[in-house]
Image (cartoon, rainbow, N blue to C red):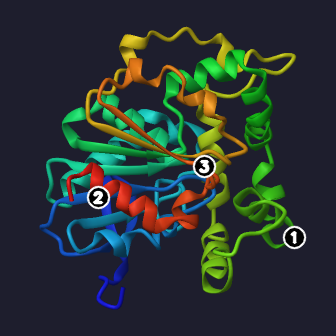
Amino acid sequence: MGGAPTITDGQYCEVSPGVTLHYASCGERGRPLMLFLHGFPEFWRAWQDVLPLMGDRWYAVAPDLRGFNLSSRPPEVAAYKAPLLVADVAALIERLGYEKAVVVAHDWGGAVGWALAIARPERVERLVILNSPHPLTFQRALANDPEQQAASRYMNWLRTPGAEAALAENDFARMERFLVGAAGARWFAGETRDAYRRAWGQPGALTGGCNYYRVSPLYPPTDDDPGAARLSLREEDFVVRVPTLVLWGDQDTALRPILLDGLERMVPRLAIERFPDASHWLAHEQPQRVAQAIRRFCGH
């Protein structure tokens, strides 16, 4: 796409006293806002191949979430509680000059997106989720499904003290395996790989990423910790009342398809599109198809 809009990064927005989010954008400010939320272990460049495909119609904005890359990186675990993350995103929408946004979110960004749509639906025009489980289906699978418990066991390791130091060893070798697996991935090379390593090397960034896992009550049980099984959640407290599209890469080894079971009970206005040959990283693997699905869902 020779005429595709270009990405501008190096932009900052203070969302609360002492907390600033760095963001990249594509398209003209004033167009409808489409907000892209990344997960772990990524940053705004999770969306580098999708943003130019949306900037012709939307003001496409991809922040670094709190704790990542060039955004504020508080060291305290409590600084990553869900209400604070939701408040960050709601404030970003407002301070960019908008009342609401189409929110597109993946992985931990998806957890924030789900929580925003539940707690602040007036800020969400439409919700698009990529391989990120609704909190209630995730809690149930972590508590009861052996396959999902096994797939999520890495979460308990990331919660341990010192996990960030281990992630930094051997020039971020474990970080790369988290992202692309032992076999690697074609998209993770050259300047993209260099940019990720710079982001991981920001002081406190690995601690910020691990703190998302440490603060969350959603993790698999162990012999001496019931994890998510200790929670008693009510469906009526987790209803998503905005139109929602879930895009799901079926080859995801960490998040199993059982997480889609029963989702329609909590998300009445739900559409699901499966990507049989995509993994957890579908926005990198199939950006054109992801962008086309979002445009259809938004009526463009």
Compared across the picture, whether 113 is left or right of 172 comes to: left
Q: CA distance from mark 2 to mark 3?
A: 20 Å
Place of residue 32 in the rendered image (x, y in percent of width and height, measured from the top left): 16, 60
Residue 298 is at least partly visible in this image: yes
Q: Name the residue rendered at 28%, 54% in the picture.
A: 296
Amino acid under disc 3: Pro
Quadrant assignment, res 234: top left
Amino acid under disc 2: Arg
Seen in the picture, residue 95 relative to 184 is either above or below; the reply is above
Could you say which disc has been placed on residue 170 in the image?
Answer: 1
Place of residue 92 in the rendered image (x, y in percent of width and height, measured from the top left): 28, 54
Residue 24 is at least partly visible in this image: no
- Which residue is label 3 attached to? 276
Sequence-wise, the earlier of marks 2 and 3 is 3
Place of residue 254 in the rendered image (x, y in percent of width and height, measured from the top left): 70, 42
- Which residue is label 2 attached to? 295
Sequence-wise, the earlier of marks 1 and 2 is 1
Q: Nearer the viewer, mark 1 or mark 2?
A: 2
Q: Quadrant of the C terminus?
A: bottom left
